Amino acid sequence: MSGVFVGMPAFPKNAAKAVQNSQLRFNLRKATHTIRGKRAAVVGELDDWAELRQAGKTIKDHTLRNLDRYLVQLEEKVTEAGGTVHWARDAAEANRIVTRLVKDTGETEVVKVKSMATQEIGLNEALAEEGIEAFETDLAELIVQLGDDFPSHILVPAIHRNRAEIRELFLKKMAGAPKDLTDEPRVLAEAARVYLRKRFLESKVAISGANFMIAETGTLVVLESEGNGRMCLTLPKTLISVVGIEKLLPTWQDLEVFLQLLPRSSTGERMNPYTSMWTGATEGQEFHLVLLDNGRTSVLADKVGRQALRCIRCSACLNVCPVYERAGGHAYGSVYPGPIGAILTPQLRGMDTELDRSLPYASSLCGACYEVCPVAIDIPSVLVDLRAKARHSRAEKAGMAAAGWVFNRSKRLAKAQRFGGRMRRLVPKRLPGPLSGWTDTRDLPEIPAESFRDWWIREGKR
Amino acid sequence: MSAAAREVILRRIRSAVEGAPEAEIVRGYRGATGERGDVELFAERVRDYKAIVHVVPRAEVAATLAEITGGRVLTVPAGFPSDMYAPSEGEPDGVVSTCAVAVAETGTIVLDAGPGQGTRAQTLVPDYHLCVVRDDQIVPNVPDAIARLDPTRPLTWISGPSATSDIELNRVEGVHGPRTLEVVIAIG
């Protein structure tokens, strides 16, 4: 993955700081609870939701199992329809391809549709280094870009900003923003509309991602709300789409499942305002598709973790997560925050940094994320599996081995409990040395004077 | 080099899934019905998105269009029924179109660049979009719409006017696409 967020401390440190920010907690609580309610209402309207979810899961699993075959089919169909397909092994290669394609047009400015894949590879930064300016056109992405900020939510990247902050930002950074700008969301949206309109009409090159690609037909699908997607996808002469290889669906018919699962899970609507579908070079456009691996094939190789590739980036798991609600998106140090980020980021980037090793622990394993996931990704199981794979300190390993030895025999456990009960006044709140890592993030339970087993034996004799 | 990258990625995939069991697709959900969609449900669901909806007998469509577009100058894409709307002179500030399919359950209109629908840009850039939907174009649900549509055509699915919830999750109608969507459903 890319260089954004590099050098960030581990999750517990970021989270500890974030929970002190009461404005952030207020914004997040309000936002996640609103969207949770909306989602539950529209999901409840469909009595075949469980079957749709099952279909979504099995279509994705089937696609991943046969990914090579379907990618080749997609390439053939896109090429037949006048598009050009490029393959990128990693972020650097994808950035090089896109940079070259933009340079070939002679343009130095591009408009962009919100895309997780291009965030992931740090495309804007790579283009900037080559003298190409990328303009984000999604309102939230624009807010993040103007603020030189990081996204904190998959669907609403500026969820951490309130209206007053956005107004300040527009006045300071947005050329031509009206002096009498208020903080009414309607007025702020209007300011963005005016600011971007000229750009849409004049830009020659657009860069997008895609929600789905159909192998059978070579069709690409983008779901959005504002119309900036339609603007970018239809008006510029050249369209470049950067899409992760796992975004594939085998057939046109498969879309009938995902067009029901995605809008209801993400924005809590029966359908999002706009969905664009195009096949190859459309209405005189030049079309390039960049297929991105960037760690996906190594995720695919992991028997437990590969289910993370089913993800359709709806963000329902973020909105129900008690940890996300309190820590916020930035604490995860990745463009993919929340529960899905906690399993996707360490798999895509590897667990080489302290931050990425800490992500599988950014969860209470309550399972709410699994329950709302429209493609049934068992996030808690993947988290547990990743925890086992993460590097552990010697002290922790020794502690776990000792605990295992004690718990393995009931007599040993009874002895240990009696000993603990007698010594309970002497047990410190914080363990010393390397063991402090354990107690810094957990409260030690009060040790009772008598264990339940002893009490049972004593009382049972009466 | 792109050719090398292609081979490397395909090889990585093959070795990653080697030995994994085949995964069967299970489709227990409601599929396409092949039936007509409910006009009232469609009208209600489109209204939920804060679009303006009129349900009128087919014979009265022309009169309805004349009434609601009074004073406006609309772009009329090629193939739009000439007996329904007569374009007036001047700088257009909106567009009138037909559609390919409409979905009752989700209140969605789908354009496929067919007759009367224009290019994708024609129904996007103006601030006002008036769409005429015939009752026989309304299908019950999403699988019915997918079954009827041709994926090789450029498709635009429209569910209400453009909107954003990016500021404190407050829904604001009207950002880059047409800020007003008006739908006339022709019945009979």
Image (cartoon, coloured by chain):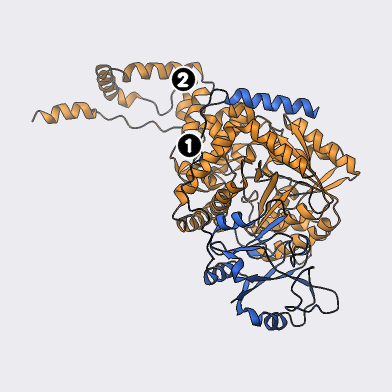
Secondary structure under the numbered disc 1 in the rendered image = loop
Farthest-out residue, right: A106
Which chain is the one coloured orange? A
Secondary structure under the numbered disc 2 in the rendered image = helix
Can residue A326 be seen in this snapshot? no
Residue in front for this viewpoint, B49 or A347: B49
Number of other residues with Cα within 10 Å of mark 2, as a class: few under 14, some 14 to 19, many 20 or more: some
What chain does mark 1 sit on?
A
Can residue A412 be seen in this snapshot? yes
Q: Which mark is residue B49?
A: none
Task: State the residue at coordinates (67%, 79%).
Answer: B61
Colour of chain B, in one word, is blue
Comparing labels 1 and 2, the label whose residue is closer to the camera: 1
Pick the quarter of the image with the C terminus of chain A.
Answer: top left
State the CA–CA distance, disc 1 to disc 2.
26 Å
Residue in front for this viewpoint, A131 or A449: A131
Residue in front for this viewpoint, A60 or B31: B31
What chain does mark 2 sit on?
A
Badge count = 2
Looking at numbered disc 2 in the image, what kind of residue is underneath it? Glu
Q: Which mark is residue A378?
A: 1
Looking at numbered disc 1 in the image, what kind of residue is underneath it? Asp
Farthest-out residue, front: B34
Look at mark 2 in the image and give the residue it sits on. Answer: A396
